[in-house]
């Protein structure tokens, strides 16, 4: 029988994992427990955020510039809670809501894939506009999430692999082509290629990181989010759920 926890199957032989997300708090929401477990297991986790989240507020009085400063500071605190050092946390500072599956963003992601050489990339669900979780529980897949995920996958293949793409990267003699073919897709509930990562013992760390994003969550909403993304009907324990894809 296949073990419920896929952690060892997926990560035992890997040392560098890259998480590419749209907004400063997405990593914590979708895979904060997994990241905490990876860091505790002495794996290197690279966090790439595409936007500063500078429009993610219902407060009409706050300016995008002020909100960007707040959210970048919150993200720095959250990454420290998860054990990711500043040098391994990058924000491209695209405007919130303006992420495109464009060559400009693919080029920037390709640069970091080549620089850090991840063996696996975690990102969000690139496919549906509506995430269908269960009867009566569905939500719109944020446009930034869709485009970030598509750009992350494009950066992995073919752009980071083939040296003729963005050849200027190789003016840096330390830069090398990359060939990452393994992915964990978060926010995917269809059961296709499902992988569960046991985060028992790390859910509190996930919560602590989420609570750093005080501009986005209350203590109650953060706890509800942690429970929603780690507790699954019919599955005892605490697991983060992904679609695990090997796409060579």
Image (cartoon, rainbow, N blue to C red):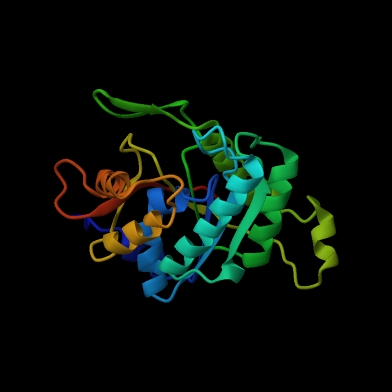
| One can see residue 17 in this view | yes
Q: Where does residue 224 sit, x and y in percent of width and height?
A: 26, 44
Most distant residue in the bottom direction: 42
Residue drawn at the location 62% of the way across and 55% of the way down: 91
**238 left or right of 177?**
left
So how many labels did they put on this image?
Answer: 0
Q: Where does residue 230 sit, x and y in percent of width and height?
A: 26, 50
Most distant residue in the front direction: 61
Q: Quadrant of residue 191?
A: top left
**168 left or right of 128?**
right
Query: Residue 57 versus residue 185: which sits nearer the camera?
Result: 57
Query: Residue 211 versus residue 165: which sits nearer the camera?
Result: 211
The answer to whether residue 148 is above or below residue 172 is: above
Residue drawn at the location 49% of the way across and 69% of the way down: 84
**91 left or right of 36?**
right
Q: Where does residue 240 sit, x and y in percent of width and height?
A: 31, 51
The answer to whether residue 202 is above or below residue 96 is: below
Residue drawn at the location 14% of the way across and 51% of the way down: 236
**109 left or right of 208?**
right
Query: Residue 159 versus residue 46: which sits nearer the camera?
Result: 46
Q: Quadrant of residue 193?
A: top left
Query: Residue 102 versus residue 224: which sits nearer the camera?
Result: 224
Q: Quadrant of residue 33?
A: bottom left
Most distant residue in the top direction: 136
- Quadrant (top left, top right, bottom left, bottom right) of the N terminus: bottom left
| One can see residue 52 in this view | no
Q: Where does residue 138 sit, x and y in percent of width and height?
A: 33, 27
């Amino acid at each position: 029988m296949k073990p419920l926890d896929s952690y060892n199957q997926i990560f035992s032989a890997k040392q560098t994992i890259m998480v590419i997300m749209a907004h400063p708090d997405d990593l914590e929401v979708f895979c904060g427990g997994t990241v905490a477990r990876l860091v505790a297991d002495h794996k290197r986790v690279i966090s790439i955020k595409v936007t500063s989240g500078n429009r993610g507020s219902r407060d009409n009085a706050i300016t995008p510039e002020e909100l960007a400063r707040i959210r970048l500071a919150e993200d720095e605190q959250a990454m420290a809670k998860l054990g990711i050092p500043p040098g391994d946390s990058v924000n491209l500072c695209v405007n919130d809501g303006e992420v495109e599956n464009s060559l400009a963003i693919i080029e920037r992601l390709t640069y970091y894939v080549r620089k850090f050489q991840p063996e696996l990339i975690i990102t969000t669900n690139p496919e549906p506009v509506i995430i269908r979780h269960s009867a009566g529980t569905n939500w719109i897949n944020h446009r930034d999430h869709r485009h970030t995920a598509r750009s992350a996958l494009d950066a992995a293949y073919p752009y980071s692999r083939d040296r003729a793409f963005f050849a200027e990267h190789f003016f840096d003699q330390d830069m090398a082509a990359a060939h990452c073919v393994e992915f964990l897709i978060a926010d995917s509930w269809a059961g296709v290629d499902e992988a569960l990562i046991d985060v028992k013992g790390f859910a509190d760390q996930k919560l602590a990181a989420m609570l750093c994003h005080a501009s986005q969550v209350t203590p109650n909403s953060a706890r509800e989010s942690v429970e929603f993304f780690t507790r699954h009907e019919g599955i005892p324990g605490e697991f983060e759920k992904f679609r695990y894809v090997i796409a060579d």
